Amino acid sequence: MRKAMAEAEVGDDVFGEDPTVNRLEKIAADRMGKEAAIFVPSGTMGNLIGMLSHCNRGDEVILGDQSHIFLNEVGGIAALGGIHPHIISNESDGTLNLETVEKKIRASDLHYPPTRLIALENTHNYCMGSPIKPGYMQHVGDLAKQYNLQIHVDGARIFNAAVALEVDIKDLVREADSVMFCLSKGLSAPVGSLVCGNKKFINRARKWRKMVGGGMRQSGHLAAAGIIALNELEDKLKKDHFNAQVLAQGLARLNGIVLDPELIKTNIIFFSLKHPTLNSDIFLKKLETQGIKILAIQSGMFRAVLHREISESQIERVIRVSEELTK
């Protein structure tokens, strides 16, 4: 990737003149079965400009209470877009109950913000990295068409979903009007995300990208790594999923760690610490002193994410160190 970045042919992407960015966008659109794509610095920006391109100020989006857009993107859709979030509880597998969704769609009324969009997440980060299946997406698509709504998919890790479900990635986004996916998650590029949709939508997104500061210049140096990620690294996600299972099964047998390996479907592991003597903050700090980094989601709850640079020997070491700490 570093060699490709150094040698990339570049131009001014704001004017559409960077050949490497143009190539990446074409590859991304083709992979998702969409007409066009736009390269952005981050997934958060990708979701933001996606929603700004679908909705006007005062419009409403239906999304899950555990979604990354709702929890971790600084309220950007409301602060910058005036878009009203209508929150529904996520099911344990990351889906939204479609009967509930239908009940939440606003009728035309002077007092209501108009419902414009349904936002989904695949894989669903806070729902154990769960992959959402094509059949569910078809049902969402049918509902959206019935009420003339758009669908946006936060597909930050959608390649993980396709690998876990053993389906063509197009089957996961066929019903979506837009999809964002990250190059910097499981695909392991250093920077960047793509937003894909039809040409008219991407033209709107390009203007929003410029407005929020995402218009980069010779960004082909970044896009070059993304091309390698898309062309060469998807198959390696299977190994990440396997390693996640090894880690989950190893942690599950330790004293004070609460974890059901059967809930782990992709490369994300959530577990809690309920130890009689070991404080969760101390547990986290002691792991860090051993060069092991996991994320504290809340008190006593942790998330570990596997990627291609985590080896089997490192997983064994994580289990071994955790076992010493929880004795």
Image: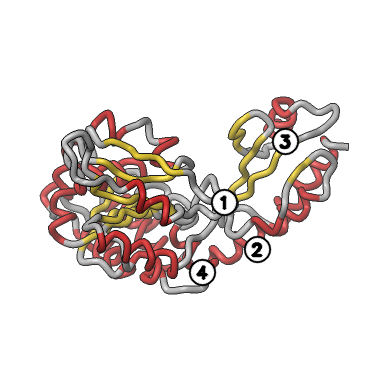
Pinpoint residue 37: horizontal percent, then vertical percent: 24, 58
In space, the residues marked 1 and 2 are separated at their CA atoms by 22 Å
Q: Are the residues tagged 4 and 3 within 8 Å (C-beta)? A: no
What residue is rendered at 29% in x and 41% in y?
Answer: 48
Q: Which mark is residue 290?
A: 3
- Identity of the amino acid at label 1? Ser
Residue ID for mark 2: 242
Q: Earlier in the sequence, mark 3 or mark 1?
A: 1
- Identity of the amino acid at label 3? Gln
Q: Which mark is residue 235?
A: 4
Q: Which mark is residue 92?
A: 1
Q: Earlier in the sequence, mark 4 or mark 3?
A: 4
In space, the residues marked 4 and 2 are separated at their CA atoms by 12 Å
Kindly report which numbered mark, 4 or 2, lies closer to the viewer in this rendering.
2
Toward the right, the furthest residue is: 327
Q: Are the residues tagged 4 and 2 within 8 Å (C-beta)? A: no
In space, the residues marked 4 and 1 are separated at their CA atoms by 27 Å
